[in-house]
Amino acid sequence: PEIIGFSNRIAYSNAPLFPMRVYSPNRLNPIETRFIANGLCEGDGQKIHNRPEAVQLVQALKRCVEHPDYEGMSFGVICLQGYEQADIIDRMLLRELGPRVIEEREIKCGNVYSFQGDERDVMFVSMVVANECERRFNARTSEADRQQYNVAISRARDQLWLFHSVRSEDLKSGCLRRQLIEYCEEPLGILCEGSL
């Protein structure tokens, strides 16, 4: 419910979606957030990337793969800006985990379009943008943006991790980036406890 709640808020407020799966009381914390204080954007357009955010995401994913609570689970990574970030993360994961683990855990990196109609047990989302971007980034407010964010967040079956290098208060009130950060910090209006 916590994961699908964001999609309900931004896309299905008139006809909310309900989770079809029953979860146990000892389930994973459904949403984890990580603020990357040293996040830094480089590149431009589709080649924009944030290496500090990528490094932190890869290390967290690696810890999950090695943790018994995640045994047998599949993983995905969606980058919300450009394609360079996904390429960087993909190369890091190959180096850190090796091709056998990537295949066994069905680890896939890409943008929203890479995951159309596809899900993973655990999804990692990289926001990419940072306060230190060389150029200011535009607010995400269009209908196309809303559809992309809906798809990105709803790909997770059991757990969603959000990595961001910008704070919600630094973003415009109508921006989907801000809405996502605020939602993940307090899903369904209730703070989730427990963290890996």
Image (cartoon, rainbow, N blue to C red):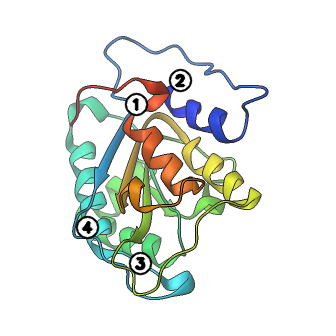
C-alpha separation, residue under disc 4 versus residue under disc 3? 11 Å
Q: Is residue 107 visible?
A: yes
Q: Amino acid at mark 3?
A: His
Label 1–label 2 contact, CB within 8 A: yes
Q: Which residue is mark 2?
A: 1
Q: Residues within 10 Å of mark 4 (few under 14, many from 20)?
A: some
- Dot 2 alpha-carbon crowd within 10 angstroms: few under 14, some 14 to 19, many 20 or more: some
- Which mark is first along the chain, 2 or 1? 2
> Pointer 3: residues within 10 angstroms few (<14), some, or many (20+)?
many
Cβ atoms under marks 3 and 2 closer than 8 Å: no
What crowding class fits label 1: few (fewer than 14 Cα within 10 Å), some (14-19), or many (20 or more)? many
The reply to whether discs 4 and 2 touch (Cβ–Cβ < 8 Å) is: no
Residue 104 in picture, x, y percent from top left: 39, 48
- Location of the C terminus (image quadrant): top left
Q: Which mark is residue 49?
A: 3
Quarter of the figure with residue 103: bottom left
Rounded to the nearest whole Å, what is the CA distance between mark 3 and mark 2? 31 Å
Which is more toward the observer, 180 or 109?
180
Say which amino acid is labelled 1: Pro
Q: CA distance from mark 1 to mark 3?
A: 26 Å
Across and down, in percent, residue 16 comes to 71, 25
Q: Secondary structure at mark 3?
A: loop
Percent x, y of residue 149:
61, 52
* Comes first in the chain, label 1 or label 3: 1
Q: Which residue is mark 1?
A: 30
Give the mark nearer the N terminus: 4 vs 2: 2
The secondary structure type at the circle numbered 2 is loop
Q: Upstream in the sequence, badge 1 or badge 4?
A: 1
Question: Which element is circle 1 on?
Answer: loop
The answer to whether one can see residue 74 in this image is no
Residue, x 45% and y 31% (percent of image)? 187
